[in-house]
Amino acid sequence: MHYTYTTKGTCSRQIDFEINGNIVTDVNFTGGCNGNLKAVHALVDGMTVEEIENKLGGIKCGFKNTSCGDQLAHAVREAYEAGQNQ
């Protein structure tokens, strides 16, 4: 299932990805630090929702209360739960 998440409190504005069961692939950020977000894409491809939450959840960027990685953790959880309710 394709999922689009609008980020909150980060330089990136949106995250698009595919989620099948609890496996996340094809993560793409709109906006943000291009190189870092390409690295996040490469590192999380094929991970489960739980793995992404454990690795990226709670990471802060500078003085912000969140980061692009943290927003991805929120996004995949939201998508997973939406898929469970279909």
Image (cartoon, grey):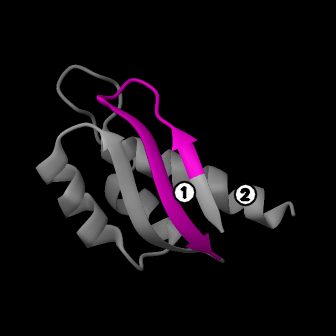
Q: Residue 27's x, y, as percent?
A: 40, 62
Residue 17 lies in the magenta stretch: yes
Residue located at (40% from left, 49% from top): 57
How packed mark 2 is, by other alpha carbons closer than 10 Å (few <14, some 14-19, many 20 or more), is few
Query: Helix or strand or loop: what does disc 1 sit on?
Result: helix
Query: What residue span does the magenta drawing correspond to?
Result: 4-20
Q: Which of the 4 quarters of the picture holds residue 3?
A: bottom right
Q: Residue furthest left?
A: 35
Q: Residue 6's x, y, as percent?
A: 52, 35
32 relative to 55 in the view: left or right: left
85 relative to 5 in the view: left or right: right
User: Residue 76's mark?
Assistant: 1
Which residue occupies the foreground of this view, 26 or 44?
Answer: 26
15 relative to 84 in the view: left or right: left
Residue located at (23% from left, 52% from top): 37
How packed mark 1 is, by other alpha carbons closer than 10 Å (few <14, some 14-19, many 20 or more), is many
Q: Which of the 4 quarters of the picture holds residue 38?
A: bottom left
Mark 2 or mark 1: whose residue is earlier in sequence: 1
Quadrant holding the C terminus: bottom right
Residue located at (35% from left, 32% from top): 66
Quadrant holding the N terminus: bottom right
Residue located at (58% from left, 70% from top): 19
Query: Helix or strand or loop: what does disc 2 sit on?
Result: helix
Q: Amino acid at mark 1?
A: Val
Q: Residue 36's x, y, as percent?
A: 16, 51
Can you identify the residue that label 2 sits on?
81
Q: Amino acid at mark 2?
A: Glu
From what the image shows, is residue 84 above or below residue 57?
A: below
Q: Residue 63's x, y, as percent?
A: 21, 19
Residue 15 lies in the magenta stretch: yes
